[in-house]
Amino acid sequence: MADDQSAAVVLDEPAVQTVPDRKAEKKKKPKRQPPYNVVLWNDDDHTYNYVINMMQKLFGFPVEKGMQIATEVDTRGRVIVLTTTREHAELKRDQIHAYGKDDLIAGCKGSMSATIEPAQ
């Protein structure tokens, strides 16, 4: 009978609680995607108004930001419009390519050119 009582006492002891491993919790966090730049390229077939309107419509930028982008692409030949995830950068590049021609320029044949590149 003494053996049965000691077994019962052992069963009644509280379970040992372990502290969660903080390193294991950190490893469970999803990896951040590397950033990509959406680059707009200059050409002579689009006006400042075209660029400003495109930046407003596709990116939600105010007129001032659109003017800044139009000026930079005209003077430097290229401008980084947005830095984001690769998937979002591809979408924005494709939207720029699909935006259409500049109606203010008679010889304009289509949209401006844009590319994506890994951000530094």
Image (cartoon, rainbow, N blue to C red):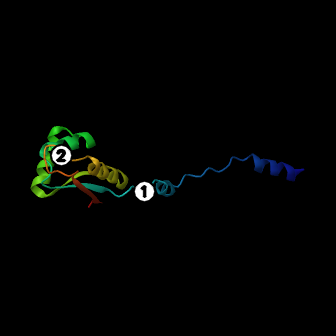
Q: Residue at x 51, y 57 (%)?
A: 24
Task: Say which label, 1 or 2, has the lower sequence index.
Answer: 1
Whole-angstrom CA distance, mark 1 to mark 2, is 41 Å
Kindly identify the amino acid type of the residue bearing the numbered disc 2. Asp
Horizontal relation, residue 88 to residue 53: left or right: right
Q: Residue at x 35, y 58 (%)?
A: 34
Q: Give the farthest residue toward the right.
A: 1
Q: Give the farthest residue toward the left.
A: 75
Q: Residues within 10 Å of mark 1 (few under 14, many from 20)?
A: few
Question: Of residues 33 and 95, which is closer to you in this image?
Answer: 95
Horizontal relation, residue 46 to residue 27: left or right: left
Mark yes or no: residue 80 visible: yes
Question: Of residues 111 and 3, which is closer to you in this image?
Answer: 111
Kindly identify the amino acid type of the residue bearing the numbered disc 1. Lys
- The secondary element bearing badge 1 is classed as loop
The residue under label 2 is 102
Foreground tag (1 vs 2): 2
Q: Position of residue 45 (x, y in %)?
A: 14, 52
Horizontal relation, residue 117 to residue 30: left or right: left
Q: Position of residue 19 (x, y in %)?
A: 56, 52
Q: Residue at x 78, y 48 (%)?
A: 9
Indicate whether 77 appears above or below 69. below
- The secondary element bearing badge 2 is classed as loop
Q: Quadrant of the C terminus?
A: bottom left
Q: Which mark is residue 31?
A: 1
Mark yes or no: residue 118 visible: no
Q: Position of residue 90 (x, y in %)?
A: 33, 54
Horizontal relation, residue 28 to residue 66: left or right: right
